[in-house]
Image (cartoon, rainbow, N blue to C red):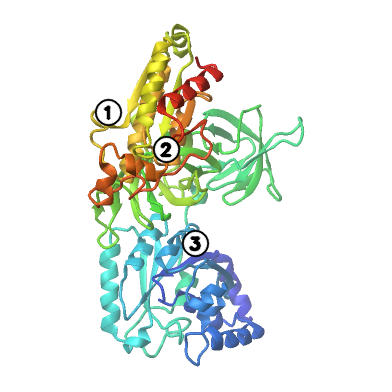
Amino acid sequence: MSPSTLQAPEIAMRPALRFITCGSVDDGKSTLIGRLLYERQLILDDQLSALERDSRRHGTAGEGVDFSLLLDGLEAEREQGITIDVAYRYFATARRSFIVADTPGHEQYTRNMVTGASNADLAVLLVDARKGLLDQTRRHAIIAAMLGIRHMVLAVNKIDLVDFDRAVFERIVAAFNDFAATLGFRTITAIPLSARFGDNVAERSQRTPWYAGPPLIDLLEQIDVEDDRSGKPFRMPVQWVNRPDASFRGFCGTIVSGAVKAGDEIVVLPSGRVTTVKEVLAPGADGKAETGDSVTLTLTEETDVARGDMLAAPRARPQVADQFAAHIVWMSPEALLPGRSYLMKVNHNSVLATVTDLKHRVDIQTLARLAAKTLSLNEVGVCNLSVARPIAVDAYADNRDTGGFVLIDRYSNETVAAGMIDFALRRATNIHRHAYTVNKAFRTALMHHKPAVLWFTGLPGSGKSTIANLVESGLHARGAHTMLLDGDNVRHGLNNDLGFTEADRVENIRRVAEVAKLMTEAGLIVLCSFISPFAAERRLAREMVQTGEFIEIFVDTPLEMCIVRDPKGLYRRALAGEIANFTGIGQPYERPEVPELHLLTPDRDPAQLAQDVIDELIRMKIL
């Protein structure tokens, strides 16, 4: 019997393994994967020749072959000797097939590591034997654990550079085991190796006689990382509603857990409508499908199902809520600001989301929970999230596919965070909106004018409050019902607990916007005079009221003129360094791009500008 015949059952028994290499910069991640491919004779002759030429041009291995260049494909990577992008490679041995993601080690590319780890079953965490555990080593271990990776290989690399010293190896392993004790890994296997020379990569090295464990490739071939997604309740987020004509309506998506067959009862979430599967359509489906299959389902009844809805087992439903606790990895140079509105992408849904409360950030050195008001680039934290409408999700620990999400900045369209849902918050379960007998329409009828929010924005000293005060006087003379909310006055009461950091400014405007919304429900014309330096918060205030009720008024005064005016002496103090985070000096002001009214103050007096505002209200038929 041939060797291939003997090994065929093992191939069938070992499903493909998805794993990542991670760790700090220059710990040898790319070199290790290149060495793995070389040891298993998976590099073609022409590739090897090209690698030898590239090693002479870009290599860092002296006269030897630099295996890291197999994966560092970008010119910038080769020139700098670092990995920037995530490089995926597929390879197979006689026992197993592999999909490996080589992830970058530099801190500024942590988001790429998150991308690579999101679908991995195992992580190979490399540590330079000379340096030991570094901040980025710990950060990658924390992220791997958060993303549901339960099997960790601690590869203590460059053991040759410490003369294969057993004490160095054991010291690093002990430090990592202490650090990772609470991270929830099912297995942690430590291997001393030299990726450059192949020690303990494909075969046991004679230079580490004190190491009794398997070489890396044997461990990867044999480790059992099977999850139980197929045994979990049925879940299928709807990716597309297929309706080519009036005679067919199918719901397309990938089954992320469980199985389904024709005749099964399912529930459509978040609506809660229970129905029955009529057909399961997919190549070779034969009326049934299971985890990982991409299918089209038809239902026995006409049921309202849209993209982003979830089809699930009715007796083991996911959570449906509009508030969640979650872990997040912040991936933007712009800090996380609680109260700011972001776009959440989850289960083919796009829904507005706000971080309502940042509970703590995680200290990557000690795993301690530290109080924080914001998260900076690459920091990890726990927060509460509120979304604009109820959605169906699972806890990430229960289902990585239906419990993960990303946050996107609505202004730049940049992905700013990856998140893992911990659980739904029950705080809103028993809270329902009260139906008023006297509603907004009745109140507005008494006022004889429409409600509106007049949002005056501009630099400190631009004249916002002066113009707003004149506008209110003019409206009062016309019999309009108004309320003026001014930045300084609000901070004496409602917002007296807030300072002037970026996070506090965001919360300040969020609260004011909520108050303005309530006042429009009363039928009032609300004049809001606030610097409101950030476009995102002005947009949030606009979206809280009905279309046509928000009028952004940009009081445009040059900074030089504001400094000359300086009615409160604040610019003088800010320029002297006595006031931090002062808009226009220590903090930027984001100018409105398309305001409803653009008031240029240098050439006109406040009374004329106030009359422009009143004329605009007449033109818009608010008065």
N-terminal of the pair, mark 3 or mark 2, is 3
**Callout 1 amino acid:** Asn
Residue matched to label 1? 489
Tell me which residue sits at (54%, 79%) in the image. 69
- Horizontal and vertical percent position of residue 614: 47, 20
In this picture, residue 491 sits left or right of residue 452: left
- Horizontal and vertical percent position of residue 145: 38, 58
Mark 3 and mark 1: Cα distance apart in space: 50 Å
Secondary structure beneath label 3: helix
460 or 217, which is in the foreground? 460
Can you say whether 557 is above or below 486 in the image? below
Can you say whether 250 is above or below 366 in the image? above
Q: Answer yes or no: is residue 431 visible.
A: no
**Callout 3 amino acid:** Gly
Secondary structure beneath label 1: helix
Which residue is the extreme one toward the bottom? Answer: 63
Residue matched to label 2? 537
Tell me which residue sits at (39%, 13%) in the image. 476
Q: Which mark is residue 116?
A: 3
In this picture, residue 556 sits left or right of residue 98: left
| Residue count near mark 2 (Cα–Cα under 10 Å), binned few <14, some 14–19, many ≥20 | many
575 or 169, which is in the foreground? 575
**Callout 2 amino acid:** Glu
